[in-house]
Image: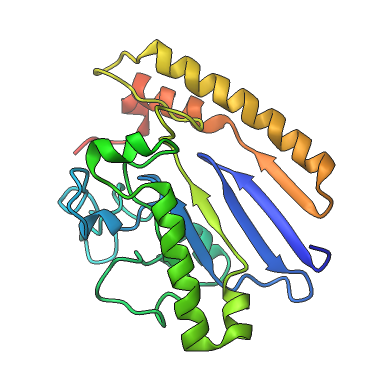
Amino acid sequence: MANMRILVLLLSLLVLLVADESSAKVSAIIVFGDSSVDAGNNNVISAVLKSNFQPYGRDFEGDRPTGRFSNGRIRPDFISQAFGLKPAILAYLDPLYTISDFATGVCFASAGTGYDNATSEVLNVIPLWEELESFKVYQNKLRAYFGNEKAKEIEDITNWGSSNGAFATGGTTNFIGQHDCLEEYNNVALEFNGKLEGLVSQLNKELLGLKMLFTRNAYDVFHDIIRRPSQYGKLY
């Protein structure tokens, strides 16, 4: 790890950015997680949870739903563009693209998944372990297409995002009803965040070359959106 510069930014759960220190350049973004970062993989599987219909995507290029659980782009897309890469990360299961299209970024995330395999089974989505297995296949395809040296460069950056966990972990919460939330799940999320913050502090001390940041305002932001929706724009 001596020749690597590592930045870890905790958003909903984890965004890990790894770049070659000599060039300080990110070559690709690889995404794992749930609906907070799914770029459309659920469109291709027989999952209950999909966002391939309007008004999803109304602010995306072409005014079209892509499978992103958003009116437009999602966080990995903005991160990719900020590093000078493509403005939108492609879903690994999208049949329109091949390994050459995924060279600068690919998304393995599946909306509705979580740390617990039982979470993904409820909505018949891709479990996290299977996302990682797909990444291994992706690595082999990269080596076959680009060669070992180029593939190694591409594999040097990983972006992880999840808001789901087994229940409502990682700074976001399952809100029930129009205004009320399920207090038990809120407490789980708060406890998780507290432990995660402690882990970040510990890893920063123990792992030289690692700079990890923890952001805990996501919980407060989502809570405020539920409590005061009129402050965040017009509802369509």
Residue situated in front as seen by the camera: 107 or 231: 107
In the rendered view, how is the structure colored? rainbow
In the picture provided, is 180 more to the left or to the right than 173?
left
Compared with 181, 33 (above or below) is below
Across and down, in percent, residue 43 comes to 21, 57
* Whether residue 228 can be seen here: no
Across and down, in percent, residue 64 comes to 20, 60
Compared with 18, 207 (above or below) is above
In the picture provided, is 200 more to the left or to the right than 115?
right
Quadrant of the image occupied by residue 93:
bottom left
Q: Residue at x 36, y 42 (%)?
A: 113
Across and down, in percent, residue 159 comes to 53, 56
Compared with 15, 180 (above or below) is above
Across and down, in percent, residue 171 comes to 50, 30
User: Tag count in the figure?
Assistant: 0
In the picture provided, is 94 more to the left or to the right than 209?
left
Quadrant of the image occupied by residue 202:
top right
In the picture provided, is 236 more to the left or to the right than 61?
left
Q: Residue at x 68, y 67 (%)?
A: 19
- Quarter of the image containing the C terminus? top left
- Quarter of the image containing the N terminus? bottom right
Residue situated in front as seen by the camera: 181 or 184: 184
Quadrant of the image occupied by residue 164:
top left
* Whether residue 160 can be seen here: yes
